[in-house]
Structure formats: C-alpha cells, structure tokens
Amino acid sequence: MLRSETLFGKKETNSPNSPFSASNNLTQPGVSNVSKTNNMTNTPSSSTGSQSSSGSGEMGSKLIVGPNIKLKGVEINDCDTLVVEGRVEATMDSRVIQIAEKGAFKGSAEIDLAEIRGDFDGDLTVRQKLVIYSSGRVSGKIRYGKLVIEEGGQLSGDVQVGGAAEQRELLQAKTA
C-alpha cells in the first residue's frame, strides 16, 4: 500500500480541494472532485475580458499541444483555440490557432484568426486575420481575409485574398 508521505518523495498535505483530503466525501453521489475544482478555477471574471465571443459567460474551449507532443491523424472541431507547441498533423475547423516558435502544424485548417510563430504547411483558410510573426513560416494553399507579416516572416505557395464574404459566396454558388 502506498503511503502519501513517500509518494514522489514529499509529504502530502491535505487541502480542502485535494482528492486525498479526509474532509472530501468521495462517495457522495452526483458530485465529483473534478467538477468542484473546475468550477473554482474556471470562473469567468468580467475584468479579464477572457469570456467567449458568444457572450454566454462561459470560457472558450482550448486545446494545447505541448512541446515534444506529436498529434497525428485527427480532426479537430468545436475548439475555440488551438495552441501548438509541439507537432500536429490534422484537419481543423475552429476559431483561433496559435503556433508557437517551435510548433508545427501540417494539414488543413479553416479558422477565423491565425497567429503563426512556427511552421504551417498545408491548406489554410483564415476567414478574418492571418498574422505571421518574424519566426513564422507558412506554406501551401493560403486564403485570408486580412494579412499581417512581421519582418522576417515567410509566406509561400498559392496565396490569395479570400475574406469571409467571398467564402460565403463560393459556398452559396456550390449549393445552388
């Protein structure tokens, strides 16, 4: 049996939010410690401005692919913000993508806002604004509404302006 004082070489202290606390009733039906913790840490604050654009008062969903993580062969949907610090090979339809300096995304993405500090290779449709920082490299079939490239940033491939209005017109023409 594991003793909490030797787990990971340090003595555990019982805190009110700890799942190992004697004061927590782990068998209480319908209540989990995870939901207690999430309710405490994810409380939106009106002063921070971190509420989602839907105005519902809930924080947006965020997926972070950390350094040294490789995510391959997935489809990412209903994610407000994707932060890429590792490597991702995927198809994505979302709101925001942020690629860190050492991050890389390969595949296709349809999003509202892209902030690229690392590498993007593939089909990229940015409905609103594409920002390429000095360390950023974007290549492939690129469509954007607005474009900002910092000195040193690289953009190559089939690049065309194609804002949200033009995308809607193309979609309507296809369905008609």
Image: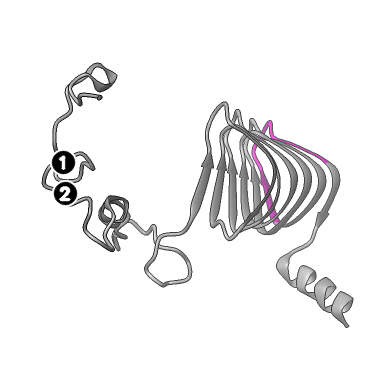
Residue 149 on the magenta span: yes
Mark number for residue 24? 2
The residue at the point 26 percent across, 22 percent down is: 7
Which x, y percent locates residue 37?
27, 51
The residue at the point 25 percent across, 62 percent down is: 29
* In the foreground, 83 or 8: 8
Image quadrant in which the C terminus is located: bottom right
Horizontal side, residue 7 vs residue 107: left or right: left
Which x, y percent locates residue 48?
32, 56
Image quadrant in which the N terminus is located: top left
Q: Which residues are magenta?
A: 146-156
Which x, y percent locates residue 171?
81, 73
Counting other residues with Cα less than 10 Å from the Cα at mark 1, is it few (<14), some (14-19), or many (20 or more)?
Answer: some
Residue occupying the far bottom of the picture:
176
Residue 55, above or below 143? below
Residue occupying the far left of the picture:
23
Are discs 2 and 1 less than 8 Å apart at CB? yes
Mark number for residue 21? 1
Instruction: Find residue 162 and report its image quarter.
Output: bottom right
